Image (cartoon, rainbow, N blue to C red):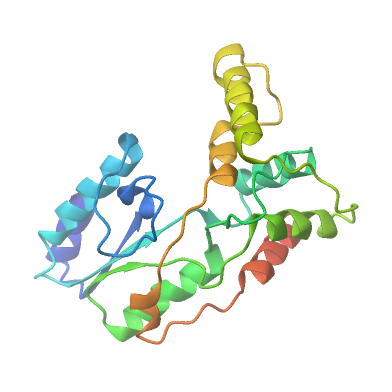
């Protein structure tokens, strides 16, 4: 609120609020700007409240709200994803896709919206789908390892997730695995960027290029 008031006081013409698709909860259908706000947990609820508060100032300046999924970059969270896959994290489904947004594409999207003088809410994510299997294969290939990993079908994957989650949350026995990463790699989330794309935005890094680029920066 203090930042919004400062922007108003200093007659800022454009304001970008970085929100999250977490505001839409874990719905299985395609997420777009019209998806219901059913965020779960404190993080999602705080983002919903931030959006509501920001809209009180939208007559004062051009308000751009960007809802992004997991932002991939050279950070500890992506390191954990790579570590877990490299240490034998099973592939839960060959068909499911890995939903994310590369940080360099996010930066480009912010600049694009500012230059377009857009004053709307946009879902911003990778425009091309990356199957989970391709994610695993890309990480294995980058590390020059043979592409052999365990694929757990249906009920077996659910049992493995519950078992490992119990070890992490209750027994505190896991060094390599983190529940939030397991959740991200075992559930598919799809995002529509049609609204932003219709204005002319195009990602500069494909999903595979983004993964490889991020892996290089981790080295």
**Compared with residue 58, is residue 53 higher up or lower down, i.e. above or below?**
above
Residue shown at 43%/82% (left/top)? 201
Along the horizontal axis of the image, is 89 left or right of 180? right
Number of marks:
0
Residue at the image point whose x is 31% and y is 35% from the top: 42
Residue 54 location, quadrant: bottom left
Drawn side of residue 52 relative to residue 215, left or right: left
Quarter of the C terminus within the rendering: bottom right
- Farthest residue in the top direction? 171
User: Is residue 55 something one can see in this rendering?
Assistant: yes
Task: Out of 50 and 128, give the one closest to the viewer.
Answer: 128
Residue 219 shows up from this direction:
no
Image coords of residue 82 (percent x, y): 71, 47
Determine which quarter of the picture holds residue 191: bottom left
Q: Could you say where residue 134 lies in the image, as x and y percent from the top left?
A: 71, 60
In the displayed structure, would residue 179 be above or below residue 78? above
x, y percent for residue 135: 69, 57
| Residue 92 relative to residue 11: left or right | right
| Residue 105 horizontal side relative to residue 152, left or right | left
- Residue at 36 percent across and 84 percent down: it is 198
Give the vertical position of 129 relative to 28 (above or below). below
Identified at 60% across, 57% down, the residue is 73
């Amino acid at each position: 609120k203090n930042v919004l008031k400062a922007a108003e006081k200093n007659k800022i013409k454009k304001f970008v609020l970085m929100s999250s698709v977490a505001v839409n909860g874990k719905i299985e259908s395609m997420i777009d700007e019209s998806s219901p706000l059913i965020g779960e947990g404190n993080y999602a609820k705080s983002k919903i409240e931030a959006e509501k508060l920001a809209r009180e100032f939208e007559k004062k300046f051009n308000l751009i709200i960007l809802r992004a999924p997991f932002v991939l970059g050279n950070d500890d969270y992506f390191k954990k994803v790579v570590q877990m896959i490299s240490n034998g994290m099973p592939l839960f489904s060959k068909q499911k896709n890995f939903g994310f947004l590369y940080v360099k594409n996010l930066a480009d999207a912010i600049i694009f919206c500012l230059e377009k003088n857009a004053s709307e809410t946009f879902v911003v994510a990778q425009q091309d789908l990356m199957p989970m299997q391709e994610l695993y294969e890309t990480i294995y290939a980058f590390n020059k390892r043979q592409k052999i990993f365990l694929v757990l079908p249906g009920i077996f994957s659910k049992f493995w997730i519950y078992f490992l989650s119990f070890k992490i949350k209750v027994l505190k026995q896991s060094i390599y695995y983190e529940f939030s990463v397991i959740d991200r790699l075992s559930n598919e989330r799809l995002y529509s960027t049609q609204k932003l794309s219709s204005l002319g935005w195009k990602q500069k890094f494909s999903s595979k290029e983004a993964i490889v680029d991020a892996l290089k920066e981790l080295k």
